[in-house]
C-alpha cells in the first residue's frame, strides 16, 4: 500500500558522523525508495548558516538528498535550527520548500504539518527570539556576513539557547494545548504532525466535540532513530525504526 514518511529533528552536524551515516542509510533504504513522499519537518541540521555554505559536510548532505529526490518526492519545512535553509539549497537537493504551516491530504482528510516551535507559546522569551530570527531583516543581515562570521554567530546562538533551556521548566518548553487548538481551528484540521519538542507521542483529544490527534515526531539519536509511516489510503500511522 502507498505510504508517506515523516521525520524531524535529526540535528545533523560534522560533530555527529553517526547520525549522518544513519541518514545516509535511511535515504538509500527500500522504505524511502518505495514511499510516496518523505517530509522533513525541520531541524534537519543542528545549524544552517546559509545556502552558500561551502563546507564538505553541507555538500555531502545535499548530494544525499539530491540522489534520494530522484526517486522519492522530498519536502522540507524549516525548523528553529535551519531557518536559513532556502530555495537555492532546496532546489539543488531535489526538495520542495514548504511554508511554516502546511496542510496536506491523507486518506481524504486534511493534516496540518508544522515544525512545532510556534506552539510553545508559554515560553515568551523563545517566541520573541523566534520572531526575530524569522524576520526578513534579520535573515538578510545574517546572510550578508562572511561565512566565518556566520559560523561564530550560530555557535553563540546555540550556546545562549542551551543556557536558557537549562533555566526553564520542562512544561514551559512544551506545546501549549490552547495554541494547538487555535492552530488546528485556523486550518480546519483534526490531525496535526509536528516535531521540535523531542517528546515523541500521540496525543488524542476532543476538538469541537470531535476526535482529534496530535502526533509528535521523535528526534534522532545515535543509538537508534525512528520515522513516522502513514498509510496514504487509510491514514493509519505507525512508528518504524530507520
Image: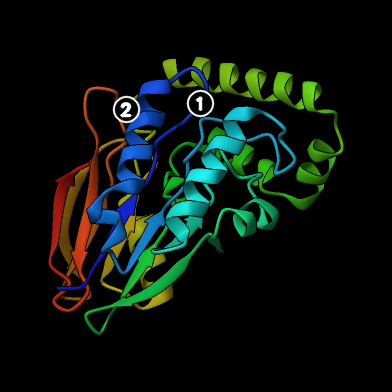
- Judging depth in this view, the residue of 12 and 69 nearest the camera is 69
Q: Earlier in the sequence, mark 1 or mark 2?
A: 1
Q: Residue at x 52, y 39 (%)?
A: 61
Q: Residue at x 79, y 27 (%)?
A: 147
User: Is 164 rendered above or below residue 81?
Assistant: above
Q: Which mark is residue 13?
A: 1
Could you tell me how far apart the alpha carbons at marks 1 and 2 are, in whole angstroms?
25 Å
Element under label 2?
Answer: loop
Quarter containing the N terminus: bottom left
* Left-right relation of 3 to 197: left
The residue carrying pointer 1 sits among few (fewer than 14), some (14 to 19) or many (20 or more) residues within 10 Å by Cα, namely: some
Which x, y percent locates residue 4? 27, 65
- Judging depth in this view, the residue of 139 and 132 nearest the camera is 139
The residue carrying pointer 2 sits among few (fewer than 14), some (14 to 19) or many (20 or more) residues within 10 Å by Cα, namely: few
Which x, y percent locates residue 228? 23, 53
Q: Residue at x 42, y 22 (%)?
A: 17
Q: Is residue 197 visible?
A: no
User: Is 60 rendered above or below residue 176?
Assistant: above
User: Is 122 rendered above or below residue 87?
Assistant: above
Quarter containing the C terminus: top left
Q: Residue at x 72, y 32 (%)?
A: 54
User: Is 68 rendered above or below residue 130?
Assistant: below
Q: Is residue 92 visible?
A: yes
Q: Which mark is residue 84?
A: none
> Which residue in the protein does label 2 denote?
170
Amino acid at each position: 500500500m502507498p505510504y508517506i514518511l515523516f521525520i524531524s529533528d535529526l540535528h545533523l552536524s560534522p560533530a555527529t558522523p553517526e547520525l549522518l551515516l544513519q541518514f545516509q542509510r535511511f535515504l538509500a533504504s527500500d522504505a524511502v525508495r518505495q514511499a510516496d513522499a518523505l517530509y522533513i519537518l525541520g531541524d534537519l541540521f543542528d545549524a544552517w548558516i546559509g545556502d552558500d555554505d561551502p563546507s564538505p559536510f553541507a555538500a555531502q548532505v545535499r548530494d544525499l538528498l539530491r540522489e534520494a529526490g530522484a526517486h522519492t518526492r522530498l519536502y522540507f519545512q524549516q525548523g528553529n535550527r535551519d531557518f536559513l535553509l532556502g530555495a537555492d539549497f532546496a532546489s539543488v537537493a531535489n526538495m520542495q520548500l514548504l511554508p511554516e504551516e502546511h496542510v496536506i491530504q491523507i486518506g481524504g482528510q486534511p493534516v496540518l504539518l508544522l515544525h512545532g516551535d510556534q506552539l510553545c507559546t508559554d515560553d515568551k522569551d523563545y517566541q520573541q527570539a523566534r520572531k526575530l530570527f524569522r524576520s526578513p531583516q534579520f535573515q538578510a543581515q545574517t546572510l550578508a556576513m562572511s561565512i566565518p562570521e556566520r559560523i561564530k554567530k550560530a555557535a553563540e546562538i546555540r550556546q545562549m539557547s542551551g543556557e536558557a533551556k537549562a533555566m526553564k521548566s520542562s512544561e514551559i518548553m512544551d506545546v501549549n494545548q490552547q495554541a494547538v487548538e487555535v492552530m488546528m481551528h485556523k486550518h480546519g484540521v483534526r490531525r496535526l504532525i509536528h516535531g521540535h519538542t523531542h517528546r515523541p507521542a500521540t496525543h488524542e483529544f476532543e476538538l469541537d466535540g470531535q476526535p482529534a490527534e496530535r502526533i509528535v515526531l521523535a528526534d534522532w539519536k545515535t543509538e537508534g532513530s525512528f520515522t513516522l509511516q502513514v498509510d496514504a489510503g487509510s491514514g493509519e500511522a505507525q512508528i518504524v525504526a530507520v
